[in-house]
Image (cartoon, rainbow, N blue to C red):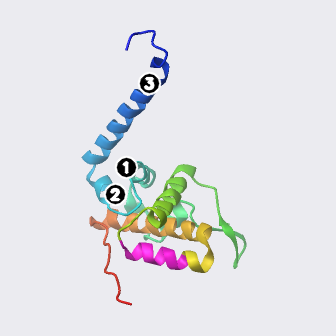
Amino acid sequence: MSGDHPLLGVISPLLLIHKIDDEVRGLAKLDETARRLMTVPGVGVVTALKIRHTIDDPSHLRSASAVGAYLDLTPRRSQPGATIGKISRWGGRLPRTYLFEAAAVLLYRTKKWSSLNAWGMKLAKRIGMRKAKVAIARKIAIVLHCIWVNGTSFDWGQAKEA
């Protein structure tokens, strides 16, 4: 295209975004931990890299269940023993957002059966889709932590006979 083409102002930012996207994918391919984290259904390049950057060192968390509190995916409490349905919003917003999106992808877009997906669908039928997505996001965070610490990949599980 010539320098004065009217679409050049639209196409050049899109090409820049494409170039940055390729660089991010390249970073994820080079990082062995990020590749293992991306074996979890719903977790993509950006989510894996953001969780890797946010947690940084998984050994400083006492247990895998502490990841939910670390990423603020726990219920907000008004007083001891009484919980309110919404999550607290004190920590970083992006990790929560990415995990929530990973939960939605797991429920809506993943075609292959997994025990995590089956658990999430049962939960959604019982308590509703919005609360279930938060619970699934918390579970995904726990699974990611376990995969990171143990050096394993996601186990899809076996479908149970009806």
Please determine whether, in this image, residue 26 is positioned above or below residue 114.
above
Residue 129 in the image: x percent, y percent?
Answer: 59, 69
The amino acid type, in three-letter code, at marker 3 is Ile
The amino acid type, in three-letter code, at marker 2 is Met
The first of marks 1 and 3 along the sequence is: 3
Circle nearer the viewer, 2 or 3: 3
The picture quadrant where one finds residue 11 is: top left
Residue 34 in the image: x percent, y percent?
Answer: 32, 53
Q: Are marks 1 and 2 in contact (CB under 8 Å)?
A: yes
Circle nearer the viewer, 1 or 3: 3
On the rendered image, what quadrant is the N terminus found in? top left
Q: Using a 10 Å C-alpha cutoff, classify the residue at mark 1 as few (fewer than 14 neighbours), some (14 to 19) or many (20 or more).
A: some
Q: Are marks 2 and 3 in contact (CB under 8 Å)?
A: no
The amino acid type, in three-letter code, at marker 1 is Val
Q: Using a 10 Å C-alpha cutoff, classify the residue at mark 3 as few (fewer than 14 neighbours), some (14 to 19) or many (20 or more).
A: few
Q: Which residue is mark 3?
A: 11
| The one of 132 and 91 positioned closer to us in this rendering | 132
The first of marks 1 and 2 along the sequence is: 2
Q: Residue at x 64, y 61 (%)?
A: 88
| Segment tinted magenta in the rendering | 113-123
Residue 92 in the image: x percent, y percent?
Answer: 56, 51
Q: Residue at x 30, y 72 (%)?
A: 155
Q: CA distance from mark 1 to mark 2?
A: 7 Å
Q: Which residue is mark 2?
A: 38
Please determine whether, in this image, residue 42 is positioned above or below residue 63.
above
Horizontal side, residue 138 vs residue 56: left or right: right
Q: Which residue is mark 1?
A: 45
